Image: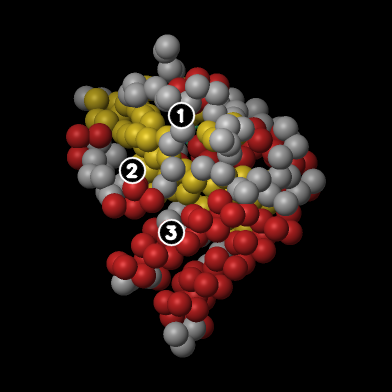
């Protein structure tokens, strides 16, 4: 039984997870636009890199420089981001699937295969233990055939498991409201699903998070408010 836990390093979230995420679990971070998916994954990477764990962050949509700039701007108390990048504990890589798609005569198979092999090479080269893919949407744009998409997703996840990495993959929900949440079939493929909701509250939005599933963990089922602050995510869980 594998019971080694990967702490997210975010206090309230680790509390909800009763310590952390079982190593080699593959996790979906799902939320509406601007809910904080990218920043949450960045903080998990940052907290683990600080403990000496090499982490790879693959950005499918934004340029790596933008990810770093936004993270520094939001998390102004994280003063050692550049140092962790220089020491290769945080590796931020950009993938541009659209160019791969256009270069490829046989778009679907080739481009997905080459994206995956680039990612795996990055993991092996850096002996990474944690990988972020931000976000899954690009892959669904490449793999328009639903069956091929699910097969490829499943093979991506099982390869991560084989490589011994724990992954956090962001996923866009069409609505940030919990009431409108539709469980996607993709949710079933992952070991864990954490959702970030934004609910409209009269004059201001309210941010809430929930652990929908986490295999192997007797996690909290509470709907918990959170905030994004200059010191990182504050997740207000209660026991
Ligand atoms: N300094 C800050 N203080 C509070 N909230 C902030 C701060 N900086 C950014 N945010 C919030 O974080 C959000 C952006 O976070 P992030 O980029 O992680 O969201 P996302 O879910 O990845 O969005 P997208 O769907 O566009 O990829 C902003 O919309 C804003 O609400
Ligand atoms: Mg994002």
* Viewer-nearest residue: 239 or 98: 239
Numbered disc 3: secondary structure: helix
Judged left or right of residue 5, residue 50 is right
In the rendered image, which quarter contains the N terminus?
top right
Numbered mark located on residue 32 in the image: 2
* Viewer-nearest residue: 163 or 181: 163
Q: Earlier in the sequence, mark 2 or mark 1?
A: 2
Q: Residue at x 23, y 44 (%)?
A: 182
Numbered disc 2: secondary structure: loop
Task: Give percent across and percent down for residue 37.
Answer: 45, 42
Q: Does residue 236 show up?
A: yes
Label 3 with label 1: CB-CB less than 8 Å: no
**Dot 1 corresponds to which residue?**
217
Numbered mark located on residue 141 in the image: none
Q: CA distance from mark 3 to mark 1?
A: 21 Å
Task: Give percent across and percent down for residue 155.
Answer: 47, 62
Q: Residue at x 52, y 72 (%)?
A: 113
Question: Disc 2 beta carbon < 8 A from ligand 1?
Answer: yes
């Amino acid at each position: 039984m594998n019971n080694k836990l990967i702490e997210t390093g975010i206090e309230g979230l680790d509390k909800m997870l009763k310590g952390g995420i079982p190593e080699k679990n593959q996790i979906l971070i799902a939320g509406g636009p601007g809910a904080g998916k990218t920043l949450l994954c960045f903080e998990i990477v940052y907290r683990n890199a600080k403990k000496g764990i090499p982490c790879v962050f693959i950005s499918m949509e934004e340029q790596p420089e933008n990810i770093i700039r936004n993270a520094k701007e939001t998390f102004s108390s994280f003063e050692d981001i550049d140092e962790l990048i220089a020491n290769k504990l945080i590796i931020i890589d950009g993938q541009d699937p659209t160019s791969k798609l256009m270069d490829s005569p046989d778009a679907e198979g080739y481009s997905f295969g080459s994206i995956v092999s680039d990612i795996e090479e990055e993991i092996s080269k850096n002996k990474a233990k944690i990988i972020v893919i931000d976000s899954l949407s690009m892959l669904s744009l490449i793999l328009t055939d639903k069956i091929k998409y699910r097969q490829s997703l499943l093979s991506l996840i099982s390869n991560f498991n084989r490589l011994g990495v724990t992954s956090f993959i962001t996923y866009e929900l069409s609505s940030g409201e919990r009431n409108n949440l539709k469980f996607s079939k993709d949710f079933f493929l992952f070991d864990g699903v954490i959702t970030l909701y934004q609910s409209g509250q009269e004059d201001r939005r309210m941010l809430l998070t929930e652990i929908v599933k986490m295999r192997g963990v007797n996690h909290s089922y509470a709907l918990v408010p959170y905030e994004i602050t200059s010191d990182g995510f504050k997740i207000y869980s209660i026991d």
